[in-house]
Amino acid sequence: MLESYIYILEFINKAKEISGRKKLQKMIYISKKFNLPFIERFNFHFYGPYSDELTVKVEELCNMGLIEEEKTKKSGATQYVYRLTNKGEDVLTNHLEQLREHIPLINNLQNQTSRFLELVATLLYFESLSMIEAIEKVKSLKSKQNYTDEEFTIAYDFIEKLKKNEVAC
Amino acid sequence: MNPEKKLSEEKVFKDPVHRYIHVRDKLIWDLIGTKEFQRLRRIKQLGTTYLTFHGAEHSRFSHSLGVYEIIRRIIDDVFKGRDEWDEGERLVTLCAALLHDVGHGPFSHSFEKVFHLDHESFTQKIILGETEVNNVLKEEGADFPTKVSEVIAKTYKNKQVISLISSQIDADRMDYLLRDAYYTGVSYGNFDMERILRTMRPREDMVVFKSSGMHAVEDYIMSRYQMYWQVYFHPVTRSAEVILSKILHRAKKLYLNGYEFKYHPTHFESIFNGSVTLEDYIRLDEGVAFYYFQQWLDEEDKILKDLCDRFLNRRLFQYIEFNALLQLDKWSELTNLFKKAGIDPEYYLVPDSSSDLPYDYYRPGEEEERLPIYLLMGNNDIRELSRESFIVEAISGKKRTDHKLYFPLDLINDTSSKKKYKEEIKRILGI
């Protein structure tokens, strides 16, 4: 049970900092789909796969003083930036590193925009559908996002590379 | 789609929360009569809460009827005839409301955690698989079961329909708050639902509330906040939940290790070995679970026997405030001392946190992570609730979280053996 908190701490630590709640949710969802050991359950919400449990755990870690949540403004909208505190780093020193081999994947996700991660996460959520059906589904559910055909192509290419471990290593 | 088939006479169910539940659609009446829906009578809405609030014996059956009734009142009494509401969505919305919890199993939360099950996935399977529910839904059209399942999975195209059943102020939450308050007997879960319903307005992709209804919505938010801390996260209920989880863990472990049960756990077998089918899942209800807990009182395995006795006879664990992550030295020391004292820490020393609970309170949802509650202002502007209400702003600001450590005080107090270690445990626990 404690491990689940440690994984979140280590993930944020490896990413250095994560800008945005949506980005944090999507990064962890995609990582879980690629077998990182997260146990939080995700369901589909208005903006793609989302985990209430992860939200509460991050709040708990903030209240424990292990994660710092900085409220910023980006293009007029509120955004939260997450990073480990010194106390959080101290807690990690007492545990074996579990995510070291996944640093390339975490860094790669970190370098993407939250809009792109939302698309990738949503396509992965509908992976049981054919590619055509999944694209139709995303276009229908996220019509306001206006994802272009080029973005779908890039997203599927990204997913394929993750599957072949080309991005992760 | 077929024209809506009506019953020759309206049927009503007497209900202590909504007074009457009205059924006029044949489809709804037929769904209520299916075996998968009737099964919900045998699953308690609040799991182990009855061990704290003895009235809390109500079922997911009554809650599901309640959610249906709230939706029926919204779409038949408030939304009907409004431009922004598509009357063609009426039946799919009513069916989704009625069936939204049909995949819940006995003591859902514990079972799901221990056995890695997902009630939402079973809801989909019951709606789409070879079931009586599916047969009834198909009468409405071949693609109708898929539409109902998509509303419940929140992947339906019409987001307004989804938000009626699943959002931060939806029919599901309104019913369970009122119903749970009624059956637990607490006074702080109540709010004026009629007023809230009258101020609801359909808008593109969502439902908003006229600003004149803000105080009724504030009451709902307060109710949600108080029920969270006073009922759902009650430490005694959590203690029972912890013991229940450990019973399931122990039984599974014994089964996988080839332990010879005196009474073979046939109903649990496929769940233990991870090959549960829809048929197995539907057969399992709380009556079956309790039957096995009774049987396991006679088992040779001392841990399983003891945990079942604690659960059935309400000999629950004691607790202290304790955050294992911030007190790793103490946590490690306690674990070692429990082992030395002959009390297996895997089953008898259990941390529990707010994130272990499937309930929450209102979050304004900045950064679009979850759709917040919107007020419709006099000038037709739309404003997020916490920006208009000081009360909501206050309780949704600082997030309160909680961490406890559960243990069997009676075993630690029994100093007839291993006295030295037990005294040391008591010193660290501060008891």
Image (spheres, coloured by chain):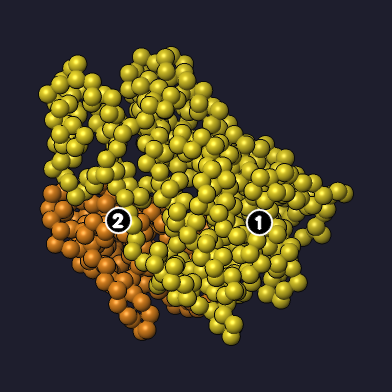
Q: Is residue B212 above or below residue B272?
A: below
Q: What is the display colour for chain A?
A: orange
> How much space separates mark 2 and mark 1, taking CA atoms?
34 Å
The image shows a total of numbered marks equal to 2
The amino acid type of the residue labelled 1 equals Ile
Where residue A104 appears, as percent x and y from the top left, is: 23, 63
Where residue A156 appears, as percent x and y from the top left, is: 42, 67
Secondary structure beneath dot 1 equals helix
Residue at (12, 53) in percent of width and height: A93
Q: Quadrant of the C terminus of chain A?
A: bottom left
Res B126 visible: no
The amino acid type of the residue labelled 2 equals Glu
**Label 2: chain?**
A
Q: Is residue B346 above or below residue B178?
A: above
Most extreme residue toward the front is: B187
Where residue B143 appears, as percent x and y from the top left, is: 68, 56
Q: Is residue B87 above or below residue B189?
A: below
Whether residue A152 sits left or right of residue A4 in the image: it is right
Q: What is the display colour for chain B?
A: yellow
Check disc 2 and report the residue beneath it: A60
Res B227 visible: yes
Q: Residues within 10 Å of mark 1 (few under 14, many from 20)?
A: many
Residue at (36, 66) in percent of width and height: B397
Check disc 1 and report the residue beneath it: B70
Q: Nearer the viewer, residue B238 or B127?
A: B238
Question: Same chain, marks 2 and 1?
Answer: no
Whether residue A87 sits left or right of residue B78 in the image: it is left
- In which image quadrant can residue B342 be found? top left
